Image (cartoon, helix red, strand yellow):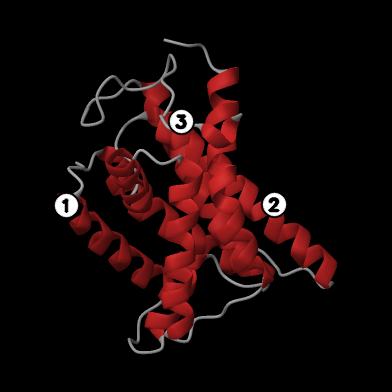
Amino acid sequence: MFLTIKNIPKVSWSSKEPLNLRPKFSTFTFLCLGLTLFGVGEGLLLVSFTGASPWSVLAQGISNYIDLSIGTITFLISVFVIALWVFLNQKPGIGTVLNAIIIAAMIDVCLKYISTPETFGLKIILAIFAVIITGLGSGIYLIANLGPGPRDGLMTGIQKKTNLPIAFVRAFLEITVVSIGWYLGGTVGVGTLLFAFGIGPCVAFGLYIVDKISTKK
């Protein structure tokens, strides 16, 4: 079962080393694809107006006190989270840097060019799709093994320290973050709950699917 996955799979296009500064073209391509899908998922959830993802709720909450865009605050949060890695023996790679840049950019692109559905039902469908696409994107770029993004590095670092399932660790982080964001005044809605409780299983499912359809090392 994909919900019991504890390790990131290795496939033919996975980098042998997360700190590889000269990855294969296929590895770099899959990394960017995964990060783009992740960012689109985050952006689509905001567009759905059903509630932001937990980390975006945190960014919204902080924006109530700091006059910066959600994208900029998201980037700054990423930098702060990377700083926490020192306690988890995690090291940033190319994927870590591109994560902070690409995801923030894709959120702004979605907000600018994609319209919000008119009916509540379509908004919920968009929110569900957003969570799934975020999980799939996460699975792709994590398997690329060029360094996890700030939030996923936190997730995998805690998983290694605790040996708990990835799905459980991710869900715990998302629920904690959304609680802080809500306290600061961020918007919480049905989409937020879908993301908080669904992203863990979706990331695990993304890892499972990408592992199954890719050539193993």
Q: Amino acid at mark 3?
A: Phe
Whether residue 115 sits left or right of residue 22 in the image: it is right
Distance from the alpha carbon under mark 3 to that under mark 1: 29 Å
Q: Which of labels 3 and 1 is toward the front?
A: 1
Q: Looking at numbered disc 1 in the image, what kind of residue is underneath it? A: Phe
Quarter of the C terminus within the rendering:
top left
Q: Which residue is labeled 1 in the image?
A: 87
Q: Is residue 105 visible?
A: no
Q: Which residue is mark 3?
A: 30
Label 2 element class = helix
Q: Residue at x 24, y 55 (%)?
A: 82
In this picture, residue 22 sits left or right of residue 98: left
Other-residue count near label 3 (Cα within 10 Å), few / some / many at <14 / 14–19 / ≥20: some
Q: Note whether 46 is above or below 97 in the view shown.
A: below
- Count of numbered tags: 3
Mark 1: secondary structure: helix
**Label located before the other in sequence (1 or 2):** 1
Using the image, determine if residue 174 lies above or below residue 214. below
- Looking at the rendering, which quadrant does residue 65 occupy? bottom left
Tell me the kind of residue under disc 2. Answer: Phe
Q: Position of residue 193 (x, y in %)?
A: 62, 66
Instruction: Identify the residue under disc 2.
Output: 129
CB contact under 8 Å: marks 3 and 1:
no
Most distant residue in the bottom direction: 65
In percent of the image, x 31 and y 47: which residue is there?
Answer: 158
Q: Secondary structure at mark 3?
A: helix
> Residue at the spot x=36%, y=53% of the render?
151
| In this picture, residue 193 sits left or right of residue 69 | right
In percent of width and height, residue 181 lies at 44, 77
Q: Quadrant of residue 125?
A: bottom right
